[in-house]
Amino acid sequence: MRRPVIAANWKMHKSSEEAEAFLRIFVPLWTDRRVEVVICPSFVSLERVAQAAGEIGLAVGAQDVYWEAQGAFTGEVSADMLVRAGCSYVIVGHSERRKIFNELDTDVGKKAQATLIHGLSPVICVGETMDERKAGLTGEVVERQLRQAVRSVERVEASRLVIAYEPVWAIGTGVTATPADAALVAREIRSLLDRLLGPGAGEEVRVQYGGSVKASNIAGFMESLEVDGALVGGASLDPAQFADLVNNSLSLREKE
Ligand code: 13P
């Protein structure tokens, strides 16, 4: 069985002090420990969040990484630095990085590779824009992005991958994909990974849905066993709201 995983992508929000204040409120409210929770703060808060998180069973992730080990790359952070700061996950290929910072599919592949080499798990983001969706290109776009992202991934590394299906049009808009669409794309991602990495790889990978996930809609997405969790932006910033989201996430599975 794959352990469900919900990640908080705080984007460019919260100072270290605010991050600590979040944890003080969130931790006692987080009751469903079947779900793995990953907090992804800004680079400058990683170490402080990791120090607090280790003792309470929270995992910590970075929002980006650079693939080189070290050198003259002003402003960049290496995978080794992230390991030493206490990370176990790294978000790679978020649509905001692709769009605002011109990240290419091939960059995402190099980042995923650097992440895995250092023992970290990449959370690889894929997803189509509204124009691509309207043109019926969802499958094609996800396939192109994923193909490059896992180009250097070995079959044995499959169980360490997290793939976040985040339709760009659903991010921060209050509009979500339907649970059925999310489950369908998750299934397509698994069958593509079987083809790219080898038979059985898709079953080992955890696939998240992302895009306007909230406490009130998470259970619908995770009712399907295809959807192993969520990548959450806005609704992860408030500790009580995020605790509700995590604690509600498996409520519809339990009814079956
Ligand atoms: P929202 O949850 O704010 O829509 O953001 C989703 C996202 O981009 C997570 O990475």
Image: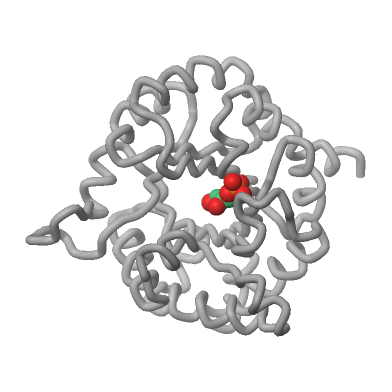
Residue 195: percent from left, percent from top:
58, 83
Q: Work out whether residue 204 or residue 222 is closer to the camera in this orientation and state it.
A: 222
Q: Residue shown at 43%/67% (left/top)?
A: 98
- Relative horizontal placement of residue 67, taking residue 97 as reference (left or right): left
237 sits left or right of 119 in the view:
right
Give the image quarter of residue 112.
bottom left
Point out residue 79 in the picture as x, y percentages from the top left corner. Answer: 26, 54
Say if residue 231 shows up in the picture. Answer: no
Q: How far across and how far down the image is residue 172, in percent?
A: 61, 50
Q: Is 214 left or right of 148, judged from the image as shown?
A: right
Give whichever of 154, 210 is nearer the camera. 210
Q: Does 11 appear above or below 73?
A: above
Farthest residue, direction right: 256
Residue 44 is situated, as x and y percent measured from the top left of the image, at 28, 36
Residue at position x 33%, y 59% in the image: 115
**Near-viewer residue (44 or 116):** 44
Please give the name of the residue rendered at 61% of the width and 60% of the height, measured from the top-left corner.
Answer: 166
